[in-house]
Image (cartoon, grey):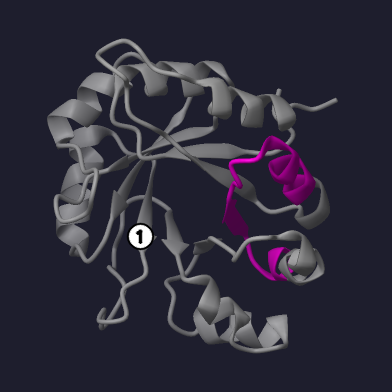
């Protein structure tokens, strides 16, 4: 069992989907916005998720309208969405059928010295029931206390460092809502090197 929830982003092949589900990931994230790099279509997402069970299925979107997101929620059986921050966005999609994780640049959270003020800036513009996701600048260690305070103010997901020791330290020192790992590409159909991903999963196992 993992010490905290883990999502895996950028799932685009069956090897990743089955491996990450088997290692205890809480959810798999599929990029379903055709305008984003690494996007898969709805049919591919449905096919891959048909091989796994017991995990959340999350769709990642950029600047996509609420009705289109909800259409894909229904079509792909999504249990949540990850929305990328867009400085040109006039408003966040309304009426979403599932909970949303909002990805925001670390610069927005670091632009003020007081974490409470940084969170207040964001909450004024985000939809109700939001969860934050960000990628703090590396190395994390210098700002553990800051990110810990942020995580106490609002649900905060962090991108996992690729180094397993750093990932474990981040989980123990910051206590985020969870970590988001990056999936990868198969070497060829059915063949995938899981060495780095396995090391992070093992580091996040409960003692």
Residues 68 and 102: in front is 102
Residue 79 is left or right of residue 194, and the answer is left
Q: Name the residue rendered at 69%, 43% in the picture.
A: 167
Residue 113 is left or right of residue 111, and the answer is right
Residues 178 and 189: in front is 189
Vertical side of 174 occupied by 86: above or below? below
Q: Name the residue rendered at 29%, 24% in the picture.
A: 13
Query: Where is residue 35, by image quadrant?
Result: bottom left
Estimate the x, y position of residue 179 in percent, counting from the top left: 60, 45
| Residue that label 1 marks | 83
- Which portion, as a residue range, is magenta? 150-171
Residue 151 part of the magenta segment: yes
Q: Name the residue rendered at 16%, 35% in the picture.
A: 42
Q: Name the residue rendered at 22%, 62% in the picture.
A: 66
Estimate the x, y position of residue 133 in percent, counting from the top left: 52, 59
For the C terminus, which image quadrant? top right
Q: How crowded is mark 1: few (under 14 residues within 10 Å), some or many (20 or more)?
A: many
Q: Is disc 1 placed on a helix, strand or loop?
A: strand
Vertical side of 26 occupied by 140: above or below? below
């Amino acid at each position: 069992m993992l010490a905290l929830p883990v999502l895996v982003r950028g799932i685009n092949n069956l090897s990743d989907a089955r491996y990450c589900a088997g290692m205890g990931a809480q959810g798999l994230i599929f990029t379903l916005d055709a305008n984003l790099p690494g996007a898969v279509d709805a049919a591919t997402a449905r096919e891959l998720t048909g091989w796994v069970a017991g995990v959340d299925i999350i769709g990642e979107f950029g600047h996509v309208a609420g009705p289109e997101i909800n259409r894909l929620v229904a079509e792909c059986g999504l249990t949540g969405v990850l929305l990328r921050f867009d400085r040109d966005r006039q408003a966040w999609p309304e009426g979403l059928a599932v909970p949303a994780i909002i990805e925001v640049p670390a610069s927005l959270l670091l632009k003020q010295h007081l974490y409470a003020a940084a969170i207040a800036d964001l909450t004024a513009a985000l939809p109700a029931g939001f969860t934050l996701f960000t990628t703090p600048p590396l190395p994390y260690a210098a700002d553990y206390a800051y990110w810990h305070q942020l995580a106490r103010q609002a649900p905060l997901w962090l991108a996992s460092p690729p180094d397993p020791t750093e990932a474990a330290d981040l989980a123990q020192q910051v206590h985020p809502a969870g970590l988001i790992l990056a999936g990868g590409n198969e070497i060829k159909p059915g063949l995938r090197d899981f060495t780095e991903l396995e090391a992070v999963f093992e580091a996040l196992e409960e003692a």
